[in-house]
Amino acid sequence: MLKLTCPNCGVTGEETEFHPGGEAHLKRFGPGSSDDEFRDYLFQRVNPRGVHFERWRHQYGCGKWFHAARCTQTLEVFGTYTAQTSEIPQNIIDAIKSRRPDWEPEA
Amino acid sequence: MSDPVTGLKGAHFTGDISVTDAGLIGMISIRGDFNAPAFRNAVAAVTGHAVPETRAISGDATGGLAWMSPDELLYFCSYAEAPSKADALSDQLTGTHHMVAVISDARAVFRLSGAGVRDVLAKGAPVDLDPARMGAGEIRRTRLGQVAVAFWFAERDVVELVCFRSVAGFVMDWFEVTAHAGSEVGFHG
């Protein structure tokens, strides 16, 4: 079971209380971008086995979006953090590195 | 004007716990910036309650103010009073980013009582209902079965629960199944 802590209301709930929103930290390519950029933005995902950054919504709770860093192999959650950021917070990076020393954030 | 009725029309059920339509209750959804002094002052002046801390509720369904999300409050008052209270809030909040809506007829309120109330809720809500983790003064928004609800302890062994009016019948049916006489669990003492 996946247990997440919503940083907006502080509730720790299991995954049925939340709704997944796909990969986090995507750069949007909209009007004015090339077809290739738009295709990659819509469809191309790295989808590594291991550390993922995801968007989640606390849909049965406070209704707010947040970001989560977790491992898709072990379901270990490294941390959750605000959705109002485009950077991965340092404390999340540190938490992942303490558990996955080989892991490096993508440039 | 037609007479207001609740979504449950006074339904009552007694099994392991007693489940009752709490009747007509005035509810106002208030949204705004909790950190703005103008918002805090207006809410306190009209409702008589300070803006609650995260996940806190002051008072109960007969008169109270609940934290619903980082930018949303739910105010409980008498049914008749709700429109005038909402007008007063709108007046006080003019010029401040906000939303005030009377939702008395869009929600249903249940009153659950009985020693097994924690066990019954635990059958459908993914919440740690240990008395040390979930006590008086806290409102928990979650799901019950597959519908969104919010509940809090008004007293020991007495829970007030609010849900959308459209699912009130389902929630009542759900309690009739999960709390039927003889289905007690006895986990939460």
Image: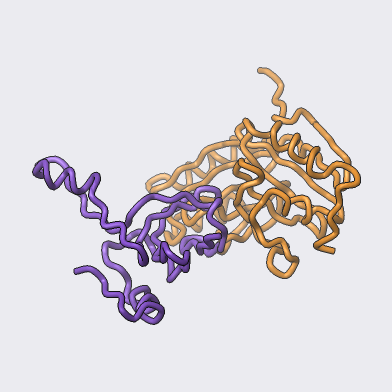
Chain colours: A purple, B orange
Of B29 and A84, which appears nearest the observer?
A84
Q: Quadrant of the C terminus of chain B?
A: bottom right
- Outermost residue, right side: B182
How far across and how far down the image is residue B78, in percent?
A: 70, 40
Of B49 and B117, which appears nearest the observer?
B117
How far across and how far down the image is residue B134, in percent?
A: 69, 63
Q: Looking at the image, is A47 positioned above or below residue B23?
A: below
How far across and how far down the image is residue B117, in percent?
A: 80, 53
Q: Residue at x 37, y 77 (%)?
A: A100
Q: Residue at x 27, y 62 (%)?
A: A86
Q: Looking at the image, is B22 positioned above or below residue B114?
A: above
Q: Looking at the image, is B153 positioned above or below residue B5?
A: below
For residue B173, which quarter of the picture?
top right
How far across and how far down the image is residue A43, in percent?
A: 24, 45
In screen coordinates, is A57 left or right of B28? left
Q: Residue at x 81, y 60 (%)?
A: B156
